[in-house]
Amino acid sequence: MRITSVVNRTFWAAVIVGLLAVEVLADPTAWVGAKIIPIDGDEIEQGTLLVDGGKIIAVGPANQVAVPENAKRVDVTGRVIMPGLVDTHSHIGGLGGADGSGPIQPGVRVYDSINVLDSGFKRALAGGLTTLNIMPGSGHLISGQTVYVKLRFNPKPTRIEDLFIRDKQGHPSGGLKMANGTNSMRKPPFPGTRGKSAYLVREQFIKAREYQAKIKRAQGDPSKMPPRDLNLETLVEALEGKRVVHHHTHRHDDIMTVLRLSKEFGFRVVLHHVSDGWKVADEIAAAGAPCSIILLDSPGGKLEALDVSFKTAGVLERAGVRTAFHTDDWITDSRIFRRMAALGVRGGMSRKAALEGLTLAGAEILDLQHRIGSLTPGKDADFAILDGDPLSVYSKVLQTWVEGVKVFDRDNPRDRLYAVGGYGAGHDQAPYLCCFDDDAQEGP
């Protein structure tokens, strides 16, 4: 009887909480009175944000935005509204990419290994993140395909497909993860030197060019097509600009090797980490390569990141390099992602560029600036509501919205748990009616 009672109570508690948590905007809704940081324009002290159908309809000073009579008004006086944050480099989801069988495995799709019920997604929402580039690790020269996702967590997703950002053809959007430096240097069949690392990559891109040429010569004739090769198919997508290369690189000489390969083969590249980026900022700018960086106040972990510096963001900005921030979650917990921009400002980056580094610059790096990254009419209604300035460590995310749906609410005890830690937060493998009686036990 006790087990049955617990099951019933748990079931109905989950149903009730779920129904209460789902808030979808069926009619126009206007948030009024908040300070609004649109990113693509000046900050608005007393603003109005109007949303309808999952899209931003209007944003501006309160006396300049016409609110429809049928719109719901939400008073957010004293709050701050900004676009949903964009993380250009995340490892949330308990994922895995390439294995130890070889250093180059571009055909591997990271989304075949993502657990959408991983608690990391809820932590990200608690930090105001709405879009992620989920990547395989950096232990390979090429470790596989990344995937761009929206954190559509209300109702709770059951498939990674529920989170996909799709291109015009309906395919999941994503890039290609590559790396150099010490991470990918191991015993054979992995390279043992930096020179051999570059050689192996160059060798595969030459093969991809040959594969591309064979396909072109076949002109759609199946009898003339080369045997299908998933690895080379992916590299051809990079050669044709359909899949941007997200490249892990730290040391200044490794950065220059990446730029050399990008120029040789013509693939688009985003430089990730760039601990020594401040040493070769002009070279990065001349190559037109954007950067996705991480700033740490407790450096360590590897010798090639020895010279990581707070000043990197500011040096890159002044050189003309488009720069976004990333978490590399767990390296930086998604809940404190905004702190990265604050450290950038501390090191000499402008406030404007730092806020763009959390939002619009990341959207541009993912080729998604037409949908996300700023509070612009016509874009997706992805935004966060805070109780203070986004660059203050004392400010908290109160709510996070994705496409007009509330996906995080700090006032909800279950959501708050993921924001502050404590009992149950991040506890993916909860006991099932074995060790204690807790009606609230449920996955993220």
Image (cartoon, rainbow, N blue to C red):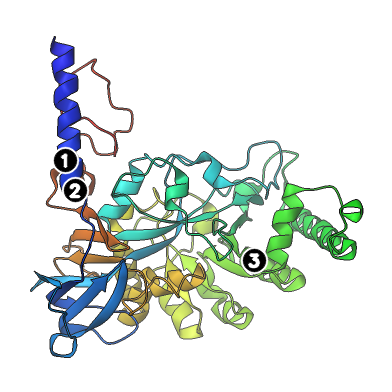
The image quadrant that residue 313 belongs to is bottom left
Q: Which one is closest to the eye, mark 3 or mark 2?
A: 2
Q: Residue furthest bottom?
A: 64
The quarter of the image holding the N terminus is top left
Q: Earlier along the polypeptide chain: callout 1 or callout 3?
A: 1
Residue pictured at 50% horizontal, 74% vertical = 278
Q: Amino acid at mark 1?
A: Val
Q: Is residue 397 left or right of residue 200?
A: left
Q: CA distance from mark 3 to mark 2?
A: 38 Å
Location of residue 181 with respect to 35 vertically, above or below = above
Residue 41's tag is none
**Residue in the picture at 15% in, 83% down:** 45
The disc placed on residue 21 is: 2
Residue under label 3, please give it: 242
| Residue type, label 2 | Ala
- Where residue 423 sits in the image (x, y, percent)? 19, 34
